[in-house]
């Protein structure tokens, strides 16, 4: 394999990984833009999306013999809807009971509360998912249902192998970005979100229901995270209760990279982070280029960005508003 | 609650209510002379007539308090003198009745679970429960007492010192007794009793008075606390099991105190703090005499401790210097990322993915015991006829480390640096405008906190005899943070209590271990919502978390003047 092919291959890998990060990162950025809260539990919302999709599959009677078009056109959308429903519900509940009461508290309080929520959600899934009759225990990884036509399929493009799961992830990000752009810029709720993020008090004076806007922000973030959860399940063909921690951390890195509070920034940041990670494992020579170090490089990137461009790649806002 | 029984009714019924309440207390006291359970397996065997078990004897303290609080006012106001208004007699009696009933309830539930069925509760248990309910019901009909004013009363200095010494002695006895309870049910009943006693004492105003006494005799307090802590191994009769837990608690507490500087004083949220403990532990491990140590330099432990501290604080500077400028929430995530970098790096430095420094996931086992000035910490020593085991030795070593940390912390807290830190926490911009060098001070806190963790880590390496990367995961950082938050950010006492609770409860409540993290997560959320300042509140912190509460502000202002008047003796009449 020549160097160009290797580069293209890693670019494709990086873009698909980055799309996953970007989908989750949007949730961090939207919520941060409006309430200045790092929703530490967002990684767990992503995990709940994957488990919600799995639960939907179980409730459908574990269909395994559907043909490819049916699976892609019917089964996959149903799984996604199930996952979205689960994570949006949980996100709204956490917002209502863990964050809303702390809205005027010092900054440390909601962040610590969010850590508590994160640990609680992980443990709740670990302990109680298997208690639902007929469900497998979530104490170890659960194999995610495969979608014929996506799972395990790939095609050759020149010297580059493209997994169908990668196509799905990148496609999902593309579709979501378009919808998100439309939602934010062309709907009443979306404009209310922009107004609230610019100045919550004035927005309230203009008749915007700030509580509803914040709920909408959490819901949008959770929906995209759930889609990422399904994509993650298809890509790695299993899910487990811990998957939200690292993915959440990476996605937050992506959000900071792009400029937190900036939706386009989250998408760009996610893609950049994915590509950097993929390239680092290939092009860093010697022992430090092995796959074991890829997370380290991602976090080093985060620290470098904070040193040299704290407002992020696309951000123009002042970072510290505390 | 207040509206259910009108004040007129309360005043009219106060004598019958008092009588009924005394009856309830007497019933509870009598109950310990009767068996509580059919069968001898539950709790500490409450199956005999006329021979109360130790837990029953402890329990009876609460109804006796109820009895005293209800009966003493009968001698009439004049005879009580200044105490008539100083203690919140009625309200305290209510609190004590509720605490006693709750303790009985825990005991009965445990009997029902252990002996399979409530039928196994015997007459004494039911009598205690009925007595408790009667007492609660009766005290509900007593008029509410005014706030206790015990702390406003003048008391001689010898009494204050005596009280501190007695309190410390009781603390030692309680700790030894609590640790000797190895069944979860026993421990829970004793914990319920303890919480009850603490609540009653607080209600009576004893704690406010003790706080004043402690502030007046700070040296006595600190000294007696250390003597008590030092004496603790002698209560264990050579058993090392509890000392192992106690020394783990101390290591955890030392790290939590270091984190307390960063989070509690300066207000920087560090989510990767365990990495500093790990850095210290790994440094000590690679410099130790272990056969697996990878560095061929074996300094004496005194030097190793310093190197471990310095390595940790260098890491602190490395991570702090670039990120402390952006501050705020970013810092939390950067430190979290740093914690992950540390763990992954320690995993990878195994010779295949990187140079061999830590043996990767296997870590460094076989770290030998310490030998300080000829005192072998691994051996069993015989002191005053009591065997002092390996963990007791490490317990003492950690006690010294903690003592140093506390002294440093207290002095910093009231120094120019400490006040600068608090100023940064409250309002960084204003602090900078007042000439506080915020960046340098934050960096100092970060490096200093890391140094303390590194020192604690170096002892931990020798105590655990092995160091592996998976001991230093994010969850441990979250636990440290929880200890600080639970106990009370910015306070020494609170953090010690928080660390003890978080380490001791899982050890004593093994049946519960699977749900430990679940409860831990919920606890963090509930603490933030209902008592963000922690069990022991730092006064400044409390105001910060309840900024809109005017009443609290005035109350604290008054308290600050009465309690800390000694700090500014020449400014007696100063008004805020």
Image (cartoon, rainbow, N blue to C red):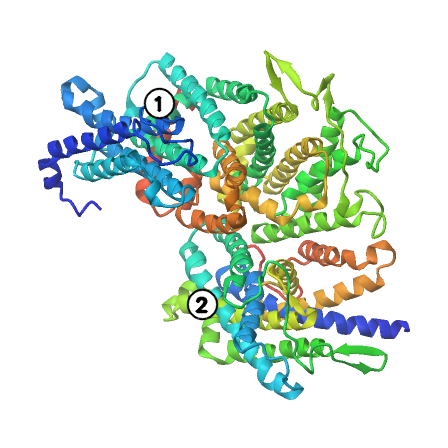
The residue closer to the viewer here, B341 or A212, is B341
- Relative side of A86 to B61, left or right: right
Disc 2/disc 1 C-alpha distance (Å):
53 Å
Residue drawn at x 68%, y 81% is A148
Q: Residue furthest bottom?
A: A69
The residue closer to the viewer here, A39 or B408, is A39
**B145 versus A198 height, above or below:** above
Residue at numbered disc 1: B572
Residue drawn at x 71%, y 36% is B281
- Relative side of B475 to A17, left or right: left
Residue B458 pos. (x, y %): 70, 32
The residue closer to the viewer here, B404 or A121, is A121
The residue closer to the viewer here, B420 or A32, is A32
Residue A225 pos. (x, y %): 57, 69
Q: Secondary structure at mark 1?
A: loop
Quarter of the image with the C terminus of chain B in it: top left
Chain letter of mark 1 equals B
**B126 versus A190 height, above or below:** above
Task: For residue B108, say whether it is visible.
Answer: yes
**B337 versus A48 height, above or below:** above
* Mark 2 surroundings: few (<14), some (14-19) or many (≥20) residues within 10 A: some
Residue B116 pos. (x, y %): 40, 45
Please tell me the numbered disc located at residue B365.
Answer: none
Residue at numbered disc 2: A215
Image quarter for residue B477?
A: top right
Chain letter of mark 2 equals A
């Amino acid at each position: 394999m020549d160097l160009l092919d290797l580069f293209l291959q890693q670019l494709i890998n990086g873009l698909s990984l980055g799309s996953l990060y970007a989908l989750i990162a949007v949730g961090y950025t939207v919520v941060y833009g409006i309430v200045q809260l790092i929703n530490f539990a967002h990684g767990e919302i992503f995990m709940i999306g994957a488990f919600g999709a799995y639960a939907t599959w179980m409730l459908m009677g574990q269909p395994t013999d559907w043909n490819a078009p049916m699976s892609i056109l019917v089964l996959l959308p149903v799984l996604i809807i199930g996952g979205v429903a689960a994570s949006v519900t949980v996100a709204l509940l956490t917002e209502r009971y863990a964050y809303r009461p702390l809205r005027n508290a010092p900054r440390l309080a909601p962040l610590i509360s969010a850590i508590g929520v994160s640990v609680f959600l992980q443990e709740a899934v670990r302990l109680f998912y298997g208690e639902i009759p007929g469900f497998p225990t979530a104490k170890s990884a659960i194999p995610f249902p495969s979608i014929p036509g996506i799972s395990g399929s790939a095609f050759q493009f020149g010297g580059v192998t493209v997994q169908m799961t990668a196509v799905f992830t990148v496609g999902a990000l593309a579709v979501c970005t378009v919808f998100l752009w439309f939602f934010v810029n062309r709907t009443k709720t979306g404009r209310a979100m922009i107004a609230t993020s610019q100045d919550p008090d004035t927005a309230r004076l203009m008749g915007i229901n700030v509580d509803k806007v914040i709920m909408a922000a959490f819901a949008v973030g959770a929906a995209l995270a759930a889609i990422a959860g399904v994509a993650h399940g298809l890509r790695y063909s299993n899910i487990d209760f811990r998957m939200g921690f690292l993915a959440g951390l990476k996605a937050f890195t992506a959000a900071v990279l792009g400029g937190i509070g900036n939706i386009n920034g989250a998408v760009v940041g996610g893609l950049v982070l994915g590509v950097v990670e993929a390239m680092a494992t290939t092009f860093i020579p010697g022992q430090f280029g092995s796959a074991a170090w890829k997370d380290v490089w991602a976090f080093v990137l985060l620290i470098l960005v904070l040193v040299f461009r704290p407002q992020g790649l696309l951000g123009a806002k002042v970072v510290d508003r505390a | 609650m207040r509206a259910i029984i009108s004040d007129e009714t309360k005043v009219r019924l106060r004598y019958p209510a008092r009588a009924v309440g005394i009856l309830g207390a007497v019933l509870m006291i009598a109950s310990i002379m009767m068996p509580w359970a059919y069968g001898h397996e539950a709790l500490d065997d409450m199956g005999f007539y006329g021979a109360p078990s130790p837990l029953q004897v402890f329990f009876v303290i609460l109804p006796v308090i109820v009895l005293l609080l209800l009966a003493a006012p009968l001698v009439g106001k004049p005879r009580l003198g200044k105490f008539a208004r100083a203690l919140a007699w009625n309200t305290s009696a209510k609190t004590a009745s509720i605490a006693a009933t709750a303790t009985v309830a825990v005991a009965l539930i445990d009997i029902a679970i252990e002996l399979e069925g409530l039928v196994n509760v015997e007459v004494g248990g039911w009598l205690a429960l009925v007595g408790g309910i009667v007492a609660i019901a009766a005290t509900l009909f007593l008029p509410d007492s005014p706030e206790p004013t015990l702390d406003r009363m003048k008391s001689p200095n010898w009494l204050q010192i005596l009280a501190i010494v007695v309190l410390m002695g009781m603390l030692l006895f309680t700790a030894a007794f609590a640790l000797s309870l190895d069944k979860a049910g026993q421990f829970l009943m004793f914990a319920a009793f303890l919480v009850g006693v603490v609540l009653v004492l607080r209600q009576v105003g004893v704690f406010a008075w003790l706080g004043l006494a402690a502030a007046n005799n700070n040296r006595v307090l600190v000294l007696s606390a250390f003597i008590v802590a030092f004496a603790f191994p002698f209560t264990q009769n050579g058993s090392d099991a509890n000392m192992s837990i106690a020394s783990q608690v101390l290591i955890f507490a030392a790290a939590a105190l270091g984190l307390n500087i960063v989070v509690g004083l300066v207000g920087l949220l560090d989510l990767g703090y365990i990495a500093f403990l790990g850095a210290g532990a790994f440094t000590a491990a690679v410099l130790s005499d272990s056969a697996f140590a990878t560095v061929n330099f074996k300094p004496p432990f005194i030097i190793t401790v310093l190197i471990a501290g310095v390595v940790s604080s260098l890491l602190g500077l490395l991570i702090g210097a670039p990120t402390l400028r952006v501050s705020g929430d970013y810092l939390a995530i950067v430190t979290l990322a740093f914690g992950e970098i540390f763990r992954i790096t320690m995993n990878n430095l195994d010779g295949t993915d990187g140079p061999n420094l830590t043996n990767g996931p296997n870590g460094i086992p076989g770290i030998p015991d310490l030998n300080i000035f000829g005192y072998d910490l691994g051996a069993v020593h015989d002191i005053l006829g009591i065997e002092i085991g390996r963990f007791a030795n490490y317990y003492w070593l950690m006690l010294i480390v903690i003592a140093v940390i506390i002294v440093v912390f207290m002095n910093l807290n009231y120094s120019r640096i400490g006040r600068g830190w608090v100023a940064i926490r409250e309002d960084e911009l204003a602090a900078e405008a007042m000439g506080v060098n915020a960046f340098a001070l934050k960096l100092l806190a970060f490096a200093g906190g890391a140094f303390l963790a590194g020192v604690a880590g170096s002892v931990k390496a020798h105590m655990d005899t092995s160091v592996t990367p998976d001991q230093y995961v994010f969850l441990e950082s979250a636990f440290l943070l929880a200890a600080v938050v639970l106990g009370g950010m910015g306070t020494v006492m609170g953090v010690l209590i928080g660390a003890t609770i978080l380490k001791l409860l899982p050890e004593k409540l093994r049946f519960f271990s699977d749900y430990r993290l679940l409860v831990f997560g919920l606890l963090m959320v509930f603490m933030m919502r209902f008592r963000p300042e922690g069990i022991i509140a730092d006064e400044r912190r409390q105001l910060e978390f309840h900024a809109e509460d005017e009443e609290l502000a005035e109350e604290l202002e008054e308290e600050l003047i009465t309690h800390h008047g000694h700090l500014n003796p020449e400014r007696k009449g100063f008004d805020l």
